[in-house]
Amino acid sequence: MSAELRDAEPRPVWWDGVETGPQTDRLAGKTRADLVIVGAGYTGLWAAIEALTEDPGCSVVIMEQGWVGSAASGRNGGFVSESLTHGIAHGEAMWSSELDELQRLGRENVSQIVEFVDRHRIEADLRMVGKTALARTPHQVEALRSAVEVYARHGEKVEFLDREAIRADVDSPCFLAGLRSYSGGLVNPMALVQGLRRVAEELGARIFERTPATDITRTGGGLTVRSTHGEVETSRILLASNAYPPLLRRLKAWMLPVYDYVLATAPLTAEQLASIGWSQNQGLSDVGNQFHYFRRTPDNRILWGGYDAIYHFGNRISPELEQRDETHLLLARHFRETFPQLADVPFTHRWGGVIDTTSRFTPIFGTAYDGRLAYAVGFTGLGVASTRFGAQVALDLLAGRETERTRLKAITGTAVPFPPEPFRWPAVELTRAALAREDETGRRGLLLRTFDRFGVGFNS
Ligand SMILES: Cc1cc2nc3c(=O)[nH]c(=O)nc-3n(C[C@H](O)[C@H](O)[C@H](O)COP(=O)(O)OP(=O)(O)OC[C@H]3O[C@@H](n4cnc5c(N)ncnc54)[C@H](O)[C@@H]3O)c2cc1C
């Protein structure tokens, strides 16, 4: 391994000082529950909390194949976004007539999360500091300038920062402009999972870790979910299994597991911090198709992730894919170029995680087994906040009720399916190359323009 990453521990910085690994027994023997949730990330935990808040008498079992927080929810960047549409520009392109309603629901979702975290005293360093999007090329500067009006049209005030203004805020020779938004914020993602777990258990949810749900069968009037050492009889199932091989075959066509990679530095000294400014301590990201996202941790490390989004042939997901020298070194090089004044700051952590990408960049919801199973999967790299909304949608569907959420096409419409292998991998690679070309040239090529026409894309 190159000297650059030699001392970087192969795990998320968020796991420092945290008890990781399973804390419960695995499910053994037979049990019964009114609701079985598959997956104990944010989606599954919010679903349990919402279901038990609505009906404290109902019994809820959560089956988790690993341990709570081991997947995306415990290892992400912690950007809390109000958007339910993978950004306002994508929302306007895809669902313009519903966008104002979606924006309102997204704002309410985040303010309810803030209120919830406060009420339950979840110590997750949740800070509503907003975010600045950064341009690195002249065409990105123009894109940011014209985005101001798009935001304004949908009631969100953002501020365009020219080169001088952005460098006065965060000093890098690479930033040519910025767009400051005051919505959303940052959170410690692992602490949020732990807080949600605590509340779910206090409300009565029974969580079984190391308990993969392996299949679903109809039994009597209900359903049975099997695992390796036990099974649960139930009347309702909620699939919150993110990018992992789904228990429902149809979901395979709609989702693509994509690896996203991250580095964290050692804590910056006061002098190093002063050399970059960043006094508002907000989230930052650049705006290419291949973008970096970066933020400070409470102890003033820089978390630096994104850019590469790697799909492995055959939808492969495996712990060994969480380390990728090529991508981690590329990220390290980009970091040094972005902040030359931090040339000596070592990287202390490196990790990766899997994202469930859909071709419309937003989750898909639906039901199976005569409405007794609902799914909420495909949050495409923007699920820290929207998973709560997604859990509510899935519960609406299970209850068979029409709500302001389920009336929206953006929510319950479906995504264009990805092709199966052996075509899937080359299709993704072709698209990645086209996206990289657009980042370089500022021109959207024929392939991407064709995808736009069908509302299809590839993102992380
Ligand atoms: C590196 C990285 C950075 C990210 N950064 C951000 C960010 O800054 N902001 C943002 O909004 N989003 C971000 N995301 C995305 C965000 O983390 C996810 O959208 C969100 O965590 C999804 O939550 P989830 O509960 O649906 O999935 P997960 O957290 O993946 O949970 C799903 C759970 O289901 C379990 N499971 C799967 N199949 C089965 C089965 N058959 N039986 C039992 N259990 C099963 C898995 O083990 C897993 O624990 C990032 C993701 C990654 C990987």
Image (cartoon, rainbow, N blue to C red):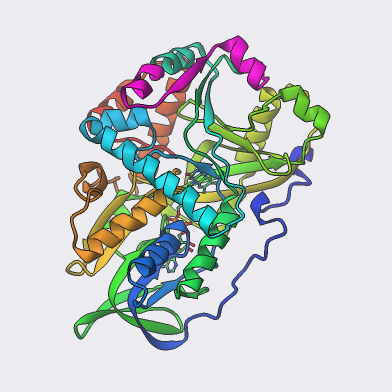
Q: Position of residue 356 (x, y in %)?
A: 41, 49
- Is residue 325 on the magenta stretch? no
Establish if 72 lies above or below 442. Answer: below
Picture quadrant of residue 212: bottom left
Question: Is residue 214 in view from this perspective?
Answer: yes
Q: Quadrant of the N terminus?
A: top right
Q: Residue at x 43, y 72 (%)?
A: 62
- Is residue 153 on the magenta stretch? yes
91 lies left or right of 130: left
Task: Name the residue furthest bottom.
Answer: 29
Q: Residue at x 51, y 30 (%)?
A: 291
Q: Quadrant of the C terminus?
A: top left
253 lies left or right of 312: left
Q: Residue at x 20, y 31 (%)?
A: 97
Q: Position of residue 135 (x, y in %)?
A: 52, 19
Q: Position of residue 272 (x, y in %)?
A: 79, 29
Q: Position of residue 248 (x, y in %)?
A: 29, 64
Q: Report the magenta residues as a range.
A: 147-172
Establish if 102 lies above or below 201. Answer: above
Question: Is residue 356 in view from this perspective?
Answer: no
Q: Residue at x 53, y 36 (%)?
A: 308
Picture quadrant of residue 298: top right
**Number of dots carrying numbers:** 0
Q: Nearer the viewer, residue 82 or 173?
A: 82
Q: Nearer the viewer, residue 271 or 121?
A: 121
